[in-house]
């Protein structure tokens, strides 16, 4: 936590520069550099964005979980700011994951959506963490909000393995498993991961800073009133 | 006073109130009955194999009625400022959680016991053929539902949109319970192989254990001043 606080500015700058360089490069790799997939053709190229986004949405939810435990343990508001940032960025990435998945699924599966285990799991987690964000918006007092949100963050994240396992048994999957990739495809995916990682870091750090700034503003307003 | 004494006292207090007012039980029972009736209008049952949908209808009735009633237990405490008094009691904070959870569970089980036979008559289907396993499924499903529901309702009664927020937070979390309970009950109704159904009982039991432990660990943070 201390390392992050002292070096937030540097990390943010690094992620911004990295993102600015990697996003166009990653897009070029996905659309031009990577070879055309033999069966699916062009729609497969969304894979270089879809997979990194899916991975980092889980990183976001994990940060919410860790932040929630950290808050209940220490009662330090910094943990709560990380928790809400993780959830907001996680929900954004989960939405992107499902949207890009749908764009791919329509031409490949012939349907925008199927109740495949992975899709269903994503949707349930999205519902849980959107609920988490709505819960936060319903509480005015900062300490109560942090406490309730932390409980919900833990309750929600504890559900991940249960949802995953039950849904996997519930319906037979058609989502492609981990594919065998051409070396150039692997390179493109790697750049996709690097670009999305930068995007993730930028949005996360900005959101955490926004949390601190909003709290500072609320304090100043409160002080001005007396 | 031991932990168990505290749990039982809180439960007895809630049940005594419930037995006199019968406020929660009448609403949950009526609500489940309405769901059962509405399902009959929503889907034309004449062309459908009732055994294929019976467990689904029954569990939707249980879960929606539970979601409607889930906040009442804690709202009653708040209205008269009783929660503060309850927190002053010389018992462990989590004893309040387990007492509330048990009283809610008993009301939910009573609702199930009333609605299931009515459902069987109205839909002309026997869901209790394997009554021991079916009862176990009902029990484990209700425990999972109340384990999370009691925890969430302790928070949601403090929110602005308190009637809405409970179900909104609870229903996605209990998705594994809904899936496993419907699969298990449905499998029993259709007479599927018991050995292949056991995995759903395991999921229900794991859900119950995980959330009872989580709730036990975090509940005191919700009610502390």
Image (cartoon, coloured by chain):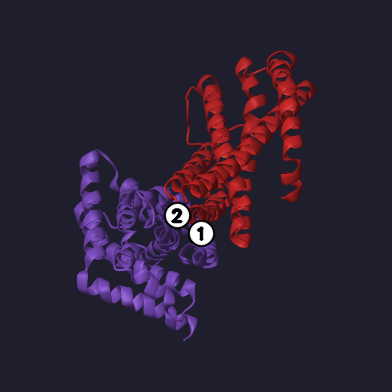
Chain colours: A red, B purple
Q: Residue at x 63, y 40 (%)?
A: A209
Of B194 and A222, which appears nearest the observer?
A222
Look at the numbered discs 2 and 1 and tell me whether their residues touch, using CB distance below 8 Å: yes
Indicate the secondary structure of the residue bearing disc 2: helix
Residue B10, numbered label: none
Residue at mark 2:
B177
Bin the neighbour count of mark 2 within 10 Å (Cα to Cα): few under 14, some 14-19, many 20 and up: many
Most extreme residue toward the bottom is B1
- The tag earlier along the polypeptide, 2 or 1, is 2
Residue A103 visible here: yes
> Which chain is indicated by disc 2?
B
Q: Residue at x 44, y 61 (%)?
A: B151
Rendering coords of residue A85 (x, y %) = 59, 42
Rendering coords of residue B25 (x, y %) = 25, 64
Of A175 and A100, which appears nearest the observer?
A100
Q: Residue at x 43, y 50 (%)?
A: A139
Of A158 and B96, which appears nearest the observer?
B96
Of B67 and B2, which appears nearest the observer?
B2
Residue at mark 1:
B207
> As displayed, is residue B38 above or below residue B224?
above
The verdict on a common chain for dots 2 and 1 is yes
Indicate the secondary structure of the residue bearing disc 1: helix
Q: Residue at x 42, y 64 (%)?
A: B143
């Amino acid at each position: 936590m201390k390392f992050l606080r002292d070096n937030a500015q540097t990390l943010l700058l690094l992620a911004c520069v990295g993102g600015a360089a990697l996003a166009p490069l990653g897009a070029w790799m996905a659309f031009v550099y990577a070879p055309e997939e033999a069966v699916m053709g062009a729609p497969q190229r969304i894979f270089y964005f879809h997979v990194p986004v899916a991975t980092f949405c889980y990183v976001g939810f994990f940060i919410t979980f860790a932040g929630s435990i950290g808050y209940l343990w220490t009662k330090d508001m910094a943990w709560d700011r990380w928790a809400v940032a993780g959830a907001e960025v996680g929900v954004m990435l989960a939405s992107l994951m499902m949207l890009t998945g749908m764009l791919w699924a329509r031409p490949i599966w012939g349907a925008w959506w199927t109740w495949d285990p992975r899709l269903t799991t994503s949707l349930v987690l999205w519902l849980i963490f959107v609920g988490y964000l709505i819960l936060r918006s319903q509480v005015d007092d900062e300490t109560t909000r942090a406490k309730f949100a932390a409980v919900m963050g833990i309750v929600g994240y504890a559900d991940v393995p249960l949802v995953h396992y039950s849904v996997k048994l519930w319906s037979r999957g058609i989502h492609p498993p981990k594919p065998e990739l051409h070396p150039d495809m692997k390179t493109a995916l790697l750049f996709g991961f690097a670009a999305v990682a930068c995007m993730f870091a930028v949005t996360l750090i900005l959101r955490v800073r926004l949390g601190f700034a909003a709290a500072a503003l609320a304090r100043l307003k409160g002080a001005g009133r007396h | 006073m031991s932990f168990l004494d505290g749990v039982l006292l809180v439960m007895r207090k809630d049940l005594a109130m419930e037995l006199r007012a019968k406020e929660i039980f009448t609403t949950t029972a009526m609500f489940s009955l309405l769901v059962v009736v509405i399902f009959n209008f929503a889907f034309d049952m004449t062309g459908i194999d009732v055994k294929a949908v019976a467990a689904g209808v029954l569990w939707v009735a249980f879960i929606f009625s539970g979601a409607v009633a889930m906040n009442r237990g804690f709202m009653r405490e708040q209205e008269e400022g009783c929660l503060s008094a309850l927190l002053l009691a010389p018992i462990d904070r989590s004893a309040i959680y387990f007492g509330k959870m048990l009283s809610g569970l008993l009301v939910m089980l009573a609702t199930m016991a009333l609605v299931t036979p009515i459902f069987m008559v109205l839909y002309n289907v026997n869901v209790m053929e394997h009554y021991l396993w079916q009862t176990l499924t009902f029990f484990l499903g209700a425990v999972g539902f109340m384990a999370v529901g009691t925890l969430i309702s302790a928070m949601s009664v403090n929110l602005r949109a308190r009637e809405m927020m409970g179900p909104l937070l609870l229903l996605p979390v209990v998705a594994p319970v809904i899936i496993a309970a419907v699969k298990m009950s449905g499998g029993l109704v259709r007479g599927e192989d018991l050995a292949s159904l056991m995995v759903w009982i395991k999921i229900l039991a794991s859900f119950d254990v995980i959330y009872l432990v989580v709730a036990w660990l975090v509940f005191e943070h919700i009610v502390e001043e």
